[in-house]
Image: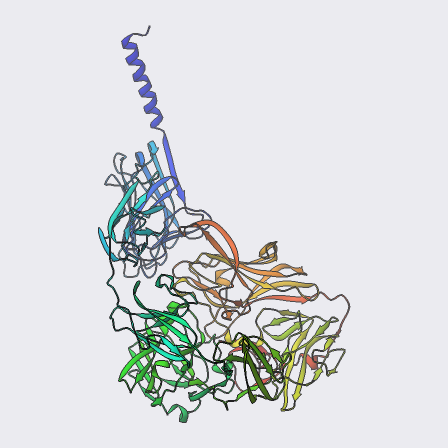
Amino acid sequence: MMTFTRKIFAMMLMLVVSTTAFAEVKTWSHVWDTSKANGGEGFYHISNNADTVQTTMLKKLEWTYRGNTSVTAYMASTGQYFGSAKSPVTHATLSTSKLLGKILSVKIEAKVKDAAQDVKIGVSVNGVKYGDACAPTTTRAQYAFTPAGDAQEGEICITMDQTSETKGIIYFFSMTIEYDGIGIVKPEPKDPELAYSKQEVTVESGDNAPANYLTNPYKVSPITYSCSDLTLAAVNKSGEVFTTGKKTGTATITATFAGNDDYKAATATYTLNVIPKPVIPAPEVSVKGGTFTEPVKVTITSTDSLCKAIWYSTQLTNVDDMGYDDKTIIVPGKTAEVTIDSTCTLLCVAVGDNNVGLPAKYDFVMNIPLKADFTAEESSMTYYSQGWDSVEEASTWKYYGISEKTWTLSDVAPFSAVPSFTSIDPNSKYSLTIFYDQSKQRERAVSPEIEVKDNSKAEFYLCFSGVWLYSANLKLMVNDLTANTQTTLFDAFKWAQDNSFEGPSWEKFSLDLAKYAGHKCTFEFIYEGSYGDNMAIDNFKLLREDASADAKINIFEGDEVHFKDLSQGHPTSWEWTIEGVTPSVYNEKNPVVKFEKAGKYNVKLVVAKGEERAETTKQEYVVVNVAAPKAHIGVPEGAYYSPYAYAFVPTNVPLQFKDLSTGNPTSWKWTFKGTDVTESTEKDPVVTYTQEGKFGLELVVENASGSARDFLVDAIQAGGTQEVWNISSDELDQIGSVELGWYGNYAGTNWLGMKSFAERYHKPIVDAQIEGVTIYFDNTKATDQNAEMTVTICLPDEKGMPGEVIATAKKKMSELVSDPNEVKPTVFQFAAPVTVNSDFFAVVTGFPNADSDKVNILCVSRGANGRNSAYHLLEDEDENYQPLGTYTWFESVDQPLSMCIAPQMSYVVKEPTAITDVTNTEVVKTGIYDIMGRKLSAPQKGFNIINGKKVIIK
């Protein structure tokens, strides 16, 4: 049996052995050589705000950053950086108290961005200074810090101080700590410090609770929310509270965090008081029911201050059934008018904010005989118009302003990516335009006095962007001179918010003027604010539907007419007989009919209800006019668009040209060069190019009203090598950047998680080879000039998204080309040509996204329902919008566009082809031409040939 003394000795021996084990020198180190996107660790907070304390794990050791700026980020090539050019570090610390043991040394690998920066980096442990502070230079180097005396235990604190006038980014590439001791210990869970900003919130029944922000300084998640009385209110996953509107009372709203390894479980609560809404009285009704033999006009009015809208229905009898459906009519304001023409119960109520008032209900019995009548939307009559197409026309309005940048007439749209108004109205010459100013603007354009007629509406077109409307907004006011009131008809900011509009684009607006019928009014556009955005207005007019007996419809061949039944007595069947169309008989209530042939046509309507019948005929109601055609040559199916040719096609392959002329031509005459057929009178002729080169062609079309000609000079390239893309020659003046507001650019640097972008191309007509890809950049500003951009050619996968990579090329950021005045190419050349015989993608990866980076590709944006060829690789997020580290390809369906990415293509020629005489295709022309060979008086926006050199003007 071991004696007591021997036991003590043995325990002491174990202690000595244990102490000796702890005395072993250990090393902890972290290297910033992996980006955030690839799973790296570091501090990452790209915007500057009050959140200047950040905590993160580096190689299982918890570190805390505190500084005057919250801007931090890390990349594989530049390491961890602190601050930015706009928000540099003046004083910051990195600290940890989670490494137990004596700290023998601390080594930091660092540098600064600018040689003029005066930066000092120091280290202390347990408050004891470790050596002298170092002054990093622009060259990456390692600095060691050791104690002058005994090694210390406790908090390790790294300080960064920047005192120079020139300040910039501080870079850390690695940290290494030598110590003896236990090592990293798991920290005790901390209090997440959850708290609501208010302890009590009061809300009226039926309303949403006002914002009561949950303070969550450490951003712990997930947070779950609950309400103690679900019959009173509910809480969604974001903490928003919605009262049920069914009762009043008090409930407790609770936010709960279940806890994790780093933070304790915690809750935060506040008291929700739901009080009743004040009662809105029933509205006044001008006709309180009865029996009638003619339609009766009823006015519904509320004088209560809480009323925001009148709701009425002739199909419902219970106010609880009313709502946002096709049986309830909602009229904003305090007055509504309704014409009763059938037996019904009129149910109406005044409605406030989530407050439905007391109802009014009256019965109407209508004994109205059957009577046939109709009109058409196209019979609307414009009785006032302003197009700003001349100084004389514009001077009928008055203009007022306080800025040098005030109203002007312009023949181009105020945005480079938007066409002029001639794209909507070919006869337009100018638009009323205003350009933003950094100083205050309050610019007004006021119409002359106009008497508003019954059933009128105001229409106008506005070219604008929704991004900067909060800085300077446009409103259309109606000044009612009869009632001496001014009312906002249109608010661009509110409309953009309601419709999630960003633009820029031309948008058409139609505004009801029923309440101003018979009043004398002026209409006033007001542009007010500072540092807003450019705008243009066009085609302002007042119009009314003309349903008179002698009204006529004047249209052109190919136009549609939208007929509208106006019959009284509620017929149950309709029979329209419409001359000039096939078929000529329609049984819909409101048929839509296209007229293809010129002439004057009668329209007859027969209506019936049981045995009762009625009919009416309007003689020569529809007048269809012949318009002279407009000739337009369509690209052959399967051909590619090109920056430097109208179309790129192969030789020795039959191609069908398309007639895209408008105006119903009746004859065609095509003239070709370089083809097996030199002339054709077919509408869509088939030809084969038998020689390589650039060739012209001509199309002349005719009808009874005249003829038109379209021609292309040296614009069709057959064979050879050419850049191809998805942008037509008609779109060249729309090339520009696609901005994403504060989030960067599409096809470029962005902070929306879009990692890569792809342009899809259709299958070539015959096998083709791709030698490289040309990209046209708008901006190429990158912090890390050695970072690489990668371009690949990919085949579609089973989902139709970029899949197998068949060619790759790379360039450093320093090799990318852009120019503020011209569009210049950047060529990514493959090591060897690659053959494609199916649809394919050109994929671009490696866009930088540091604060000061801006690298983006030029694009053509086409607006809703436009043609799209762009795709993006988007980072996946969980239900709390947190990144998952995975990515998915999406087509850009919400913003259809094409990128200025042009593969260098040549068709695989299976048989020898002749080469055209150089004098016919390769002569260098002196002067300025467009890509279709038309001579220009001066360079235009887009692609130009200047003395034989290809030049692209922004």
Towards the viewer: 691 or 564:
564
Towards the viewer: 165 or 206:
206
Residue 36 picture location, percent across and down: 43, 50
Q: Is residue 218 visible to the viewer in this orientation of the structure?
A: yes
Q: Is residue 535 visible to the viewer in this orientation of the structure?
A: no
Residue 923 picture location, percent across and down: 66, 81
Residue 894 picture location, percent across and down: 49, 64
Instruction: Please state the total of marks drawn on the protein image.
Output: 0
Task: Establish if 384 lies above or below 239.
Answer: below
Residue 283 picture location, percent across and down: 29, 71
Q: Residue furthest bottom?
A: 392
Q: Is residue 933 left or right of residue 160?
A: right
Towards the viewer: 464 or 209:
209
Residue at 35 percent of width and 89 percent of height:
451
Task: Establish if 918 lies above or below 141.
Answer: below
The quadrant holding residue 295 is bottom left
Q: Residue furthest left?
A: 199
Towards the viewer: 351 or 53:
351
Q: How is the image coloured?
A: rainbow
Q: Is residue 151 left or right of residue 858?
A: left
Q: Quadrant of the N terminus?
A: top left
